[in-house]
Image: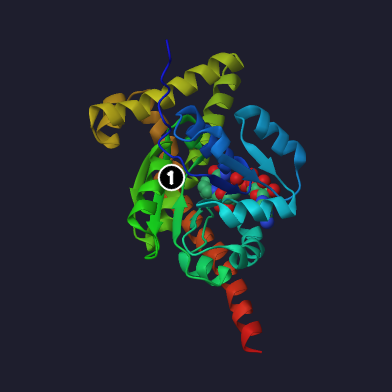
């Protein structure tokens, strides 16, 4: 009997320009959910052939760092995901601009980099989707902020939403809010991991084995997140239910308050947003340099 395999949701080729952790997280999620077939995914990096071989064998995608071949992929792909570090973005965009055609969609995951700066460095009004995903996309539990340039067509809008909805939840926001969102969900997993590191260390210091301490911490974080999600109760209400007056939780929270826990987290989110703006401003300066060169 002939077996029917479902057609992947996305049939277009997607080229990942930059093959690091964030690209891998998205690719892993897309392939695991069969949203895109591996042979429609191309991953490019500057020079690390070993990394490309690893990605090829893990996911069955195509990888390249050959300059001519990379340009061929970039010149023809309907969707290009920009996923290099901010410091590498200006050079990459300047090189990309001249080889693009009008309706190729640029999807950026780069922190701080604005739509205006992307189009300026490309030297053309390309349709651009600015996003801020997080690495939990790799297990389908990502949270991605999305903003569109006005050149993005309805179909391209749908396509980019399909990509990120396949790997988690999405929030379409005004571009001006992207830095705040970075402070919450883009960088947020790192704050939670840091707290988990501290909890695991505390368990070990108190005599639990590393495995016990890790397992208990993981289940506690997972259970707490699920409780907020499934009960619909506010975190503050759930916290109160754990906290018996004069009990051990209250004693622990008092120590956190002495360390200004609540305001420290808010300050961290705010510094994260500010740092994203600084990285964006550095890229704006690159654009200003291009304009000066044009005028001289
Ligand atoms: N790691 C994370 O949790 C998140 C990262 N991002 C953004 O994703 C971007 C990438 O971050 P990571 O994946 O963590 O970095 P990474 O350092 O793991 O990967 C960057 C990749 O870009 C490649 N690259 C650099 N210049 C290139 C060029 N000209 N052409 C092709 N490839 C080039 C490098 O070879 C490397 O494969 C950053 O801009 C970051 O702001 C966004 C959300 C979350
Ligand atoms: O640390 C960074 O700059 C990137 C942006 C969000 C998560 N990682």
SS of the residue under disc 1: helix
Is residue 29 at least partly visible in the picture?
Answer: yes
Q: Is residue 225 above or below residue 145?
A: above
Q: If the image is split into quadrants, where does the C terminus sit?
A: bottom right
Q: If the image is split into quadrants, where does the N terminus sit?
A: top left
Count how many numbered circles sit on residues in the image. 1
Q: Residues within 10 Å of mark 1 (few under 14, many from 20)?
A: many
Q: In the orientation shown, which residue stands out farthest toward the top?
A: 1
Is residue 244 at least partly visible in the picture?
Answer: no
Q: Is residue 166 above or below residue 105?
A: above
Q: Residue placed at 48% from the left, 18% from the top?
A: 216
Q: Residue placed at 35% from the left, 52% from the top?
A: 155
Closer to the camera in the image, 157 or 164: 157
Closer to the camera in the image, 67 or 281: 67
In the rendered image, residue 270, in percent from the top left (x then y), is placed at 45, 56
In the rendered image, residue 157, in percent from the top left (x then y), is placed at 36, 52
In the rendered image, residue 18, in percent from the top left (x then y), is placed at 63, 48
Q: In the orientation shown, which residue stands out farthest toward the front?
A: 1
Q: Residue placed at 23% from the left, 32% from the top?
A: 233
In the rendered image, residue 5, in percent from the top left (x then y), is placed at 43, 22
In the image, is 133 to the left or to the right of 68?
left
Q: How is the image coloured?
A: rainbow
Closer to the camera in the image, 111 or 195: 111
In the image, is 202 to the left or to the right of 185?
right
Q: Mark 1 vs ligand 2: CB under 8 Å?
A: no
Dot 1 corresponds to which residue?
A: 185
């Amino acid at each position: 009997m002939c077996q029917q395999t479902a057609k992947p949701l996305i049939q277009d080729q997607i080229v990942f320009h930059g093959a690091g952790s964030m690209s891998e997280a998205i690719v892993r999620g897309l392939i695991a959910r069969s949203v895109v077939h591996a042979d429609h995914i191309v991953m490019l990096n500057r020079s690390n052939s070993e990394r490309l071989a690893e990605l090829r064998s893990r996911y069955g995608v195509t990888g390249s760092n050959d300059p001519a071949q990379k340009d061929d992929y970039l010149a023809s792909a309907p969707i290009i995901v920009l996923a290099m570090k901010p410091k590498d973005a200006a050079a990459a965009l300047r090189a990309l601009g001249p080889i693009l055609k009008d309706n190729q969609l640029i999807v950026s995951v780069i922190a701080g980099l604005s739509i205006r700066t992307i189009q300026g460095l490309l030297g053309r009004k390309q349709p651009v989707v600015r996003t801020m995903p997080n690495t939990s996309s790799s297990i389908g539990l990502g949270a991605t902020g999305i903003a569109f340039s006005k050149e993005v067509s309805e179909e391209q809008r749908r396509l980019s939403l399909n990509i990120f909805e396949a790997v988690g939840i999405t929030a379409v926001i005004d571009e001006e809010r992207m830095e705040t969102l970075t402070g919450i969900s883009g960088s947020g997993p790192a704050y939670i991991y840091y707290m988990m590191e501290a909890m695991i260390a505390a368990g070990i210091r108190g005599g639990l084995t590393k495995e016990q301490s890790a397992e208990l911490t993981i289940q506690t974080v997972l259970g707490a997140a699920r409780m907020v999600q499934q009960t619909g109760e506010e975190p503050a209400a759930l916290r109160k239910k754990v906290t018996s007056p004069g009990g051990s939780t209250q004693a622990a929270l008092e120590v956190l308050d002495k360390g200004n826990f609540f305001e420290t987290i808010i300050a961290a989110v705010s510094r994260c947003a500010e740092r994203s703006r600084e990285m964006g401003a550095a890229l704006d300066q690159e654009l200003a340099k291009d304009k000066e060169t044009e005028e001289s």
